[in-house]
Image (cartoon, grey):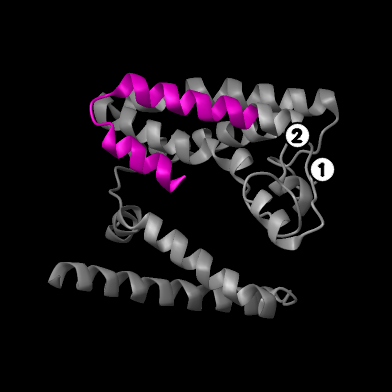
Amino acid sequence: LMLFFGLMKLMQGKDGSKIGISVCIVLVAILVNTFVPAEAYSTGNDWADTLIGLFIRENDYSWFPLVTWVIHPLAGYWLGIIYRKLNDRRGFIKLLLILGIPTFTLSEIMVTVKGLPHEVLNPGGYDEFYFYAMSTWSMIGGFGLLVLELALFMILREIFQFSLPQVVAYVSKNVIFIYVTQWLILGCLYPYLFHITNLWINLSIGLCVMFVVYLLCRLKDRVFREG
């Protein structure tokens, strides 16, 4: 995914090529997600299965496999570009509603008709397996729901005329570093923490990890600024 964003940065001014690459990635993800059953290609080797699990749901360590979740960062990338070029908040809200309402509605209808688990909108909680190995329709529905949530945020911003706090702007600027660092820390701690089910202990651990990541992010800023 980082290679994709690096490629997009190199292809400055070539919007047609960027769109073509993005569409191809989404189509491949949909085809693989539709026709490759989860946990169908176990090799019997933990290392190999973990590698496969980076792309599709293969074992209990397949968290956010690429083909199921790639649609979200791609959507964020293009919606961000459209928002900057459109320079019209109300027009952007209309676009979000046009994208989100039919996408989410159609997804929920298809999931219901096909008798698939409702991973996106499930008041009873989610099944870990189906959450990480969403069906294609649930993957599309997840995109629709996120777009609608963004539209709601933009509408509230229009009504109450509030500005984004500095912390949100800072997190947005450093989101890749924060995400990867947090992922590495939690990944290393998982063998020691996975059995903890107490809400308040987990919340405390999460806050501590967030604070450590913030300190590392500030250290990174200082090193590059002085360098």
Identify which amino acid the numbered label 2 is placed on.
Val
Asked if residue 125 can be seen in this view, the reply is no
Kindly identify which residue carries mark 2.
36
Residue sitting at x 64%, y 35%: 139
Asked if residue 18 can be seen in this view, the reply is yes
Image position, residue 161 (x, y; %): 29, 42
In the image as oriented, which residue stretches furthest toward the right? 115
Image position, residue 197 (x, y; %): 74, 74
- Give residue 40's mark: 1
* Real-space CA distance between mark 1 and mark 2, rounded to the nearest whole angstrom: 7 Å
Residue sitting at x 83%, y 23%: 113
Identify which amino acid the numbered label 1 is placed on.
Ala
Of 212 and 164, nearer the camera is 212
Image position, residue 135 (x, y; %): 73, 34
Specify whether residue 16 is painted magenta: yes
Stretch of the chain drawn in magenta: 1-30
Residue sitting at x 65%, y 24%: 105
